[in-house]
Amino acid sequence: MNYKLGSYLPSPWCFALLLTLAACDSSNEAEPQVNNSGPVRSVQLKTSGSISGEFSPADESKTKLVARCDSGDFAIFTILFRPAEGWRQVGASVQTKDAIKAGQTGPVEIDWVLITFTDDNYDATEFRGPAEFVINSNDINAPRLSATIKGQIPGYGGIMATEKVEPDRSIDFKFDFDLNFACGLTG
């Protein structure tokens, strides 16, 4: 199962727009998920600095995945979830510099990671920059992808941010995720 967006996605504006649209989704409806059969198995974000805390979904079945990994140029995906408390939505987006090959594991060079915190008034606080991305497993047959993204990224006044977060405000973060999804070109 490969979750896709349209053909080419300009970065990072398209994903900022997707984050905005997903944040505005007030739907509380979700199809029942059996045995973690949805695209997202688990997600945890730990941060310190400008925003500190541990964030994981209040309901994993409502966690959203938007991804494009079959491009010959790069992989790009976003994971969005509503944490148990504190924020309406937390999102993490990443764009790699190159395509992710089938079965590829280990460090992956990325263009950027964008971490977004959206409150109940739909005001967003964003952090964007380079980080370390390590794929622990990437099985296109299962499909399954587990990885960690970590680093220190500065504030970002992007398309979704209500107020510009000054670059001297930053977060240290570690984002672990496990997906019923895999990236990889078969060619």
Image (cartoon, rainbow, N blue to C red):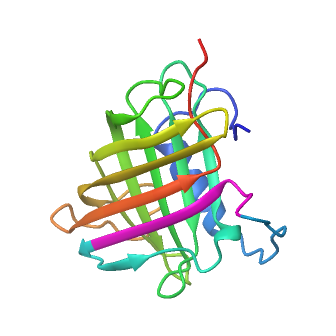
* Residue 97 figure quarter: top left
Q: Give x and y (percent) for residue 32.
A: 83, 70
The answer to whether 18 appears left or right of 45 in the picture is right
Front residue (pair 102, 119): 102
Residue furthest out toward the bottom: 85
* Residue 4 figure quarter: top right
Q: Quadrant of the C terminus?
A: top right
Mostly what secondary structure, the magenta segment? strand
At horizontal 58% and vertical 69% (from top left) the residue drawn is 81
At horizontal 28% and vertical 49% (from top left) the residue drawn is 129
Front residue (pair 43, 3): 43
Residue 173, relative to residue 12: is it above or below? below
Front residue (pair 84, 156): 84
Q: Give x and y (percent) for residue 84.
A: 54, 85
At horizontal 57% and vertical 35% (from top left) the residue drawn is 139
Q: Is residue 41 magenta?
A: yes
Residue furthest out toward the top: 187
Residue 173, relative to residue 131: is it above or below? below
The answer to whether 49 appears left or right of 54 in the picture is left
Front residue (pair 76, 57): 57
Residue 116, relative to residue 145: is it above or below? below
Q: Quadrant of the N terminus?
A: top right
> How many labels sit on residues?
0
Magenta residue span: 36-47
At horizontal 51% and vertical 64% (from top left) the residue drawn is 43
The answer to whether 79 appears left or right of 133 in the picture is right
Q: Give x and y (percent) for residue 152.
A: 21, 58
Q: Is residue 84 magenta?
A: no
Residue furthest out toward the left: 168
Q: Give x and y (percent) for residue 92.
A: 46, 57
Residue 122, relative to residue 67: is it above or below? below
